[in-house]
Image (tube, grey):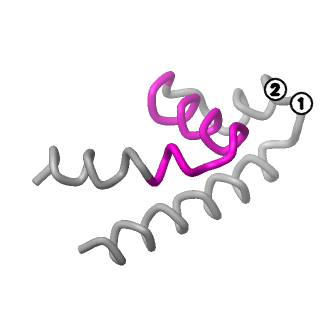
Amino acid sequence: ELVEDFHALAPLIAGLDERDRQIIHLRFVEELTQSQIGERLGCSQMHVSRLLSRTLKRLREGLLTNR
């Protein structure tokens, strides 16, 4: 099931803009905190939180639509 989710998620992530893909990468691959991501991108932790929430919501909805 995890492999299926990964295959379903890959095209959704590819469809994100560069900034959103970068935030996903920094958070879940490099495992940085929202504050660390904000420092790298030159924005606040709160802005990173909002962007991350919006992006994860979009990915969740995409996964549910594809099932």
Residue at the image point whose x is 52% and y is 59% from the top: 56
Residue at the image point whose x is 64% and y is 33% from the top: 22
- Helix, strand or loop status at disc 1: loop
Q: Label 2, label 1: how many angstroms apart (C-alpha)?
A: 5 Å
| Picture coordinates of residue 21, whole percent (x, y) | 60, 39
| Picture coordinates of residue 62, whole percent (x, y) | 43, 68
Magenta residues, dominant SS class: helix
48 left or right of 59 in image: right
Does the segment drawn in magenta span residue 49? no
| Residues at marks 2 and 1 touching, judged by CB atoms closer than 8 Å | yes
9 left or right of 22 in image: left
The amino acid type of the residue labelled 1 equals Gly
Please tell me whether residue 31 is drawn above or below residue 15 in the rendered image.
above
Q: Quadrant of residue 27?
A: top right
Does the segment drawn in magenta span residue 13? yes
Residue at the image point whose x is 61% and y is 33% from the top: 33
Residue at the image point whose x is 45% and y is 27% from the top: 29
| Picture coordinates of residue 67, whole percent (x, y) | 23, 74
Crowdedness of circle 2 by 10 Å Cα count: few (<14), some, many (20+)? few
The amino acid type of the residue labelled 2 equals Glu
Q: Find residue 56 and name its label.
A: none
Q: Quadrant of residue 39?
A: top right
Q: Quadrant of the N terminus?
A: bottom left
Q: Find residue 39 and name its label.
A: 2
Say which of 58 and 29 sits in front: 58
Specify the segment rendered in magenta.
12-30
- Helix, strand or loop status at disc 2: helix
Residue under pointer 1? 42
| Picture coordinates of residue 57, whole percent (x, y) | 53, 68
